[in-house]
Image: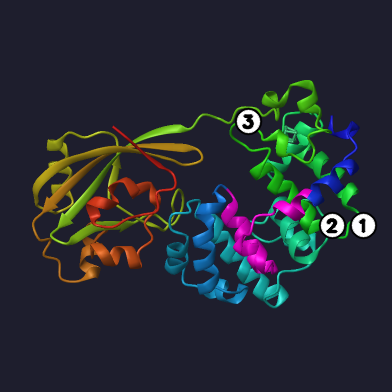
């Protein structure tokens, strides 16, 4: 159990290992509070390699809290396009506005105050406070849960909120008076990300704790950490339409609330439809279909929902609308230049499988094509 384990003995070998094995990452070069914040939010649910180019682009365009607070929403979502979980960036902007109003644009060097900002939980607050301000507070993510439950052979369910509090309390105690709390937290995460890895067998031979690790001694690595199964995802069957009028393609804005709120999407409906039904559907949109072609199936996984998509390419007669306002009023569709759609409108990667039929490419982090 973690409470019976002497965490103190882990520190020295861990920091020694980290000094020789820390990966070079863009946000580590200049760990300002803002850059640490941006990187930690991006890294939630997204791999390091995928985050790197987003981080560079985002911090170049929005180099500080003020720029983030003032960024128009469409542009902000465009900068995030492909990373998914768009509420992360919306909350960041709300927090940035809060930081401008309450702290003059500087993230507070105070764990409790950081926790009060929108979208910042104990992990992110701990990361910013320790890495950017050297405040001795823990930052417990999935990596930290994994390595600490393994090293101490603790089989408590890590999904229990009380276990997080316990782990944070134990770490907080051991971190008191620590000179480099930021390096300690980063070393824990790094060990979990690169040695005691989340998928597949851990690389115990390379682990600085291999002589101390109780799970290894007791042959219990595979059963730790213990976690209750998350609820099964809801399956939603959707039909996606790539409606084209020569070099223009139809997109529409999603509602301001709910899944993928405020982003642009290819028109789509719930359920499965035959080719004849698609023709009917498109006519109901006040359009004149010339040709309907079945496209491949695709799947996109959100945290609680899985979209199983069937696609159709529909060629329509020139829509004949005069102004963008008229098009919008007619059926909420906008016919946009295929190439311009990519520059101007944030289209989530859920539609990546059909982007090639629009003539563009979308980040495809989370989609799998199925036949
Ligand atoms: S010895 Fe192996 S199981 Fe134990 S913490 Fe290190 S990598 Fe993980």
Query: How far across and how far down the image is residue 234, in percent?
Result: 45, 32
Closer to the camera: disc 3 or disc 1?
A: 3
Tell me whether circle 2 and circle 3 mark residues in contact (CB < 8 Å): no
Distance from the alpha carbon under mark 1 to that under mark 2: 7 Å
Residue 216 lies left or right of residue 80; in this view the side is right
Query: How far across and how far down the image is residue 352, in percent?
Result: 34, 49
Q: Is residue 41 magenta?
A: yes
The image shows residue 228, relative to residue 361, as above or below, that is: above
Mark 2 surroundings: few (<14), some (14-19) or many (≥20) residues within 10 A = many
Q: Which residue is mark 3?
A: 201
Distance from the alpha carbon under mark 2 to that under mark 3: 31 Å
In which image quadrant can residue 29 be found?
A: bottom right
Query: How far across and how far down the image is residue 210, in percent?
Result: 78, 34
In which image quadrant can residue 202 be found?
A: top right
The image shows residue 181, relative to residue 144, as above or below, that is: below
The image shows residue 168, relative to residue 360, as above or below, that is: above
Range of magenta residues: 17-44
Observer-nearest residue: 189 or 346?
Answer: 189
* Mark drawn on residue 177: 1
Q: Earlier in the sequence, mark 2 or mark 3?
A: 2
Q: Quadrant of ligand 1?
A: top right
Q: Earlier in the sequence, mark 1 or mark 2?
A: 2
Q: Is residue 305 magenta?
A: no
Count the numbered circles shown. Answer: 3
Distance from the alpha carbon under mark 3 to that under mark 1: 35 Å
Q: Which residue is mark 2?
A: 136
Observer-nearest residue: 6 or 115?
Answer: 6
Q: Residue at x 43, y 69 (%)?
A: 75
The reply to whether residue 17 is in sight is yes
Q: Residue at x 53, y 66 (%)?
A: 56
Quarter of the image with the N terminus is top right
């Amino acid at each position: 159990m973690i409470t019976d384990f002497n965490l103190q003995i882990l520190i020295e070998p861990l920091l020694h290992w980290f000094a020789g094995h820390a990966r070079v990452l863009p946000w580590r070069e200049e760990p300002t509070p803002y850059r640490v914040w941006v990187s930690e939010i991006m890294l939630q649910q997204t791999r390091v390699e995928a985050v790197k180019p987003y981080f560079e682009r985002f911090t170049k365009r929005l180099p500080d809290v003020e720029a983030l607070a003032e960024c128009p929403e469409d542009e902000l979502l465009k900068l995030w396009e492909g990373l998914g979980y768009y509420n992360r960036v919306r909350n960041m902007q709300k927090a940035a506005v809060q930081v401008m109003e309450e702290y003059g644009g500087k993230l507070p060097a105070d764990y409790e105050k950081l926790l009060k900002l929108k979208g910042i939980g104990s992990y992110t607050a701990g990361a910013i406070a320790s890495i950017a301000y050297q405040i001795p507070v823990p930052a417990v993510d999935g990596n930290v849960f994994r390595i600490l439950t393994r090293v101490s052979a603790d089989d408590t369910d890590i999904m229990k909120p009380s276990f997080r509090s316990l782990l944070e309390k134990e770490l907080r105690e051991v971190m008191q008076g620590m000179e480099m709390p930021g390096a300690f937290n980063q070393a824990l995460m790094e060990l979990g990300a690169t040695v005691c890895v989340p998928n597949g067998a851990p690389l115990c031979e390379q682990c600085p704790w291999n002589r101390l690790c109780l799970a290894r001694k007791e042959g219990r690595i595979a059963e730790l950490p213990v976690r209750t199964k998350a609820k099964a995802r809801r399956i939603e069957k959707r039909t996606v339409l790539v409606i084209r009028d020569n070099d223009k393609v139809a997109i529409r804005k999603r509602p301001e609330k709910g899944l993928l709120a405020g982003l642009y999407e290819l028109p789509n409906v719930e359920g499965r439809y035959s080719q004849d039904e698609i023709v009917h559907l498109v006519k109901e949109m006040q359009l004149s279909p010339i040709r309907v072609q079945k496209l491949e199936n695709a799947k996109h996984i959100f945290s609680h929902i899985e979209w199983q998509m069937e696609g159709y390419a529909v060629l329509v007669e020139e829509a004949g609308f005069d102004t963008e306002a008229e098009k919008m009023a007619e059926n909420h569709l906008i016919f946009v230049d295929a190439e311009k759609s990519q520059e101007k409108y944030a289209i989530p990667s859920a539609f990546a499988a059909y982007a090639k039929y629009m003539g563009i490419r979308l980040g495809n982090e989370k989609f799998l094509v199925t036949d």
